[in-house]
Amino acid sequence: MRLFIAAMAACLSLGMPVGAAAQDARPGATTTLEGWEAVGRLNFANGNICTGALVAPDLVLTAAHCLFDPRTGVRVAPSSVRFEAGLSGRQVVALRHVVKAVVHPQYRYRPAGTHQIGSDLAVLKLDRPISRSRIRPLAVSQDAERGDTLGVLSYTRRRASQPGLERSCSVLARQSRTLVLSCLVDFGASGSPVLEMRPGLPPRLVSVISAKAAMGKRRVTIGTALDGSLLDLMQRAG
């Protein structure tokens, strides 16, 4: 059966005043998910934020549309981006600046409402690696399928300085590299890792969050599933 999806909000990046401090985290809000410190907030000089995740000591995976200014459509300079790994309140496990950004070769930025999905991936090169003794990068998988229950870990408008974990994201449908998820995410969640979480095993990254959408009258979230193109992006990023 062919899948019809109407894009509602292409970009889930969140605009914040440049230089604004994140709100204090609520006591006890830190997630207990093993390895969550590999996820961090991406801060852009234009005031936007997205979420990203370490897939190598010096490489961060996020959504490609995060690298374009939503007001002008112009691609942002990598040097205008910084990654706050394991941000919790006012504390970070590691802070790094971005020196290079590689976007999926099939991705073309489009205005909100006509957002391109299925290739919304980008890999960011950090100015220096983060030691594995501090943060272990997330393992990746291409196994997400319809019927799976996954989790999403993200920084959002309501949780700008503390990651929130949604544990009950069902895969309603998959079409090529596009996942339709039952959970609803907030602005700032662009690029958030969609995680396979199995008891006794560390989480594995299977997708990144791309957009809000509607499937019929039902609100859903769209993720870009990982495939062999991720390795190519990582090699190109260096």
Image (spheres, grey):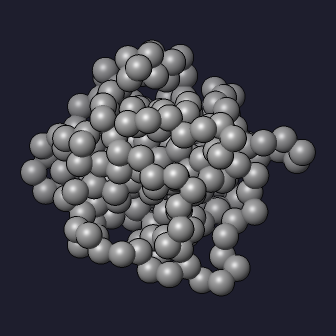
Q: Quadrant of residue 133?
A: top right
Q: Please give the name of the residue rendered at 44% of the width and 80% of the height, measured from the top-left corner.
A: 23
The answer to whether residue 181 is left or right of residue 212 is right
Q: Please give the name of the residue rendered at 13% of the width and 56% of the height, measured from the top-left corner.
A: 71
Which residue sits furthest left? Answer: 72
Return the residue nearer the eye: 97 or 42.
97
Return the residue nearer the eye: 214 or 139.
139
Q: Where's residue 17, x and y in %?
A: 23, 72
Q: Is residue 4 visible in this depiction of the protein?
A: no
Return the residue nearer the eye: 56 or 208.
56
Which of the image's four quarters has the N terminus? top right
The answer to whether residue 31 is left or right of residue 213 is right
Q: Quadrant of residue 213?
A: bottom left
Q: Where's residue 202, x and y in %?
A: 78, 42
Return the residue nearer the eye: 6 or 197.
197
Q: Where's residue 31, x and y in %?
A: 69, 65
Q: Is residue 70 visible in this depiction of the protein?
A: yes
Is 106 located above or below residue 32 in the figure?
A: above
Q: Please give the name of the residue rendered at 36% of the width and 75% of the height, measured from the top-left corner.
A: 21
Q: Where's residue 157, x and y in %?
A: 41, 72
Q: Please give the name of the residue rendered at 30% of the width and 31% of the height, measured from the top-left corner.
A: 100
Which of the image's four quarters has the C terminus? top left
Picture mark count = 0
Is 47 located above or below residue 207 in the figure?
A: below
